[in-house]
Every structure is written in structure tokens, then in C-alpha cells.
């Protein structure tokens, strides 16, 4: 390889590395933040799968809320759903609210899953993944505990 070609290749690699570094710095400084400990949970509204009404997180202000983001394709989600249901049954009369937020699936997929695991707590549909992005969910299952203050 001639000297000018090697210089061009080195310059290109250096430019790519600098671009990657600039992107990493920008992402860490200007990236939108999800929920933060000690701050109010971002409010949102989603459709409830079994009756198609829209529900808002703020409707539960003053109560302890567990938000659980899940998908029927997620093996750990299938494993933890019965445990969440047991806790819901145990503490719902004391004011605990559990809301399962399904990520990107239709009611046709969600309903058989919910019936198969015996979930009775509310399931909301984030079919457009807007709340999933708002809460910076990755990976799933992902659970938030929101106090009632």
C-alpha cells in the first residue's frame, strides 16, 4: 500500500473513532432520563386490555404501585407472573396496586397468556411502546415500585 493510501485509511479510522466517542459523550450527557429514585414517576395513560378503557398512572396517586413491564415471549416474565399475582392477592386489600404493562402485543395474544397464569391484577397495553420508551425499559421483565407519597 502506498503512503498516501495508508494515511487515508488511518485518517478514516481515526475519524470513525472520534465520531463514536462524540456520540457516546452526547448520549450520556443529553440522553433522556427515565424515572429517578426520589422523583415523581412519569405519568401516562394506556388502554386496559380487558375492557378497552384508558387508565392513568396518576389515578393511583397516594397508593403503593408496582409497575411490571412484560411480554408473553419472555420466559422470566412467565415465571414471575404467578408470584406477582400471589402478592397482589395478599396485599390488595391493604391498598397495593399492581399493574402489568404488556409491551407491544395485541389483546389476542395477551388474553390467553393472562388466563393461563391466572392473573387478576390490571393489565395495560403499551402497543406502541411509548411508555416502554418513557420508562427506558430494557431488558424485561422490568419492575418499578412507586410509593404512595
Image (spheres, rainbow, N blue to C red):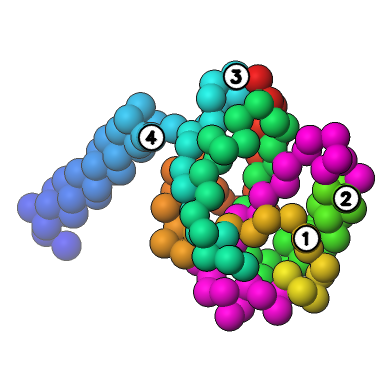
Q: Disc 3 versus disc 4: distance between alpha carbons?
A: 17 Å
Graded by Cα atoms within 10 Å as few (under 14), some (14 to 19) or many (20 or more), the crowding at tag 4 reads few
- Residue name at image x 64 percent, y 59 percent: 123
Label 3 near label 2: C-beta < 8 Å? Answer: no
Location of residue 68 in the rendering, given as x and y in whole percent from the top left corner: 67, 50
Q: Disc 1 versus disc 4: distance between alpha carbons?
A: 33 Å
Mark before the other along the chain sequence, 1 or 3:
3
Mark before the other along the chain sequence, 2 or 3:
3
Front in this rendered view, residue 112 or 14: 112
Helix or strand or loop: what does disc 1 sit on? loop
- Figure quadrant of the C terminus: top right
Q: Nearer the viewer, mark 2 or mark 4?
A: 2
Q: Disc 2 versus disc 3: distance between alpha carbons?
A: 27 Å
Identify residue for label 1: 120
- Residue name at image x 45 percent, y 58 percent: 129
Mark before the other along the chain sequence, 1 or 2:
2
Q: In the image, 37: left or right of 77? A: left
In the image, residue 10 lies in the stretch drawn in magenta: no
Span colored in magenta: 90-113
Helix or strand or loop: what does disc 3 sit on? loop
- Residue name at image x 81 percent, y 70 percent: 117
Graded by Cα atoms within 10 Å as few (under 14), some (14 to 19) or many (20 or more), the crowding at tag 1 reads some
Front in this rendered view, residue 31 or 113: 113
Location of residue 127 in the rendering, given as x and y in whole percent from the top left corner: 47, 64
- The mark found on residue 32 in the picture is 4
Identify residue for label 3: 38
Label 4 near label 2: C-beta < 8 Å? Answer: no
- The mark found on residue 89 in the picture is 2
Q: Nearer the viewer, mark 1 or mark 4?
A: 1
- Residue name at image x 18 percent, y 50 percent: 12
Amino acid at each position: 500500500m502506498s503512503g498516501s493510501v495508508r494515511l487515508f485509511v488511518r485518517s478514516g479510522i481515526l475519524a470513525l473513532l472520534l465520531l463514536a466517542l462524540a456520540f457516546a459523550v452526547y448520549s450520556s450527557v443529553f440522553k433522556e432520563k427515565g424515572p429517578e429514585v426520589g422523583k415523581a414517576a412519569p405519568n401516562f395513560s394506556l388502554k386496559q386490555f380487558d375492557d378497552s378503557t384508558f387508565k392513568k398512572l396518576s389515578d393511583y396517586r397516594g397508593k403503593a404501585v408496582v409497575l411490571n413491564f412484560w411480554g408473553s415471549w419472555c420466559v422470566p416474565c412467565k415465571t414471575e407472573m404467578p408470584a406477582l399475582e400471589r402478592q397482589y392477592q395478599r396485599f390488595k386489600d391493604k391498598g397495593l396496586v399492581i399493574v402489568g404493562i404488556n409491551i407491544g402485543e395485541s389483546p389476542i395474544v395477551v388474553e390467553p397468556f393472562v388466563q393461563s397464569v391466572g392473573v387478576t391484577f390490571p393489565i395495560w397495553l403499551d402497543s406502541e411502546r411509548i411508555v416502554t420508551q418513557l420508562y427506558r425499559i430494557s431488558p424485561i421483565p422490568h419492575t418499578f415500585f412507586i410509593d404512595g407519597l
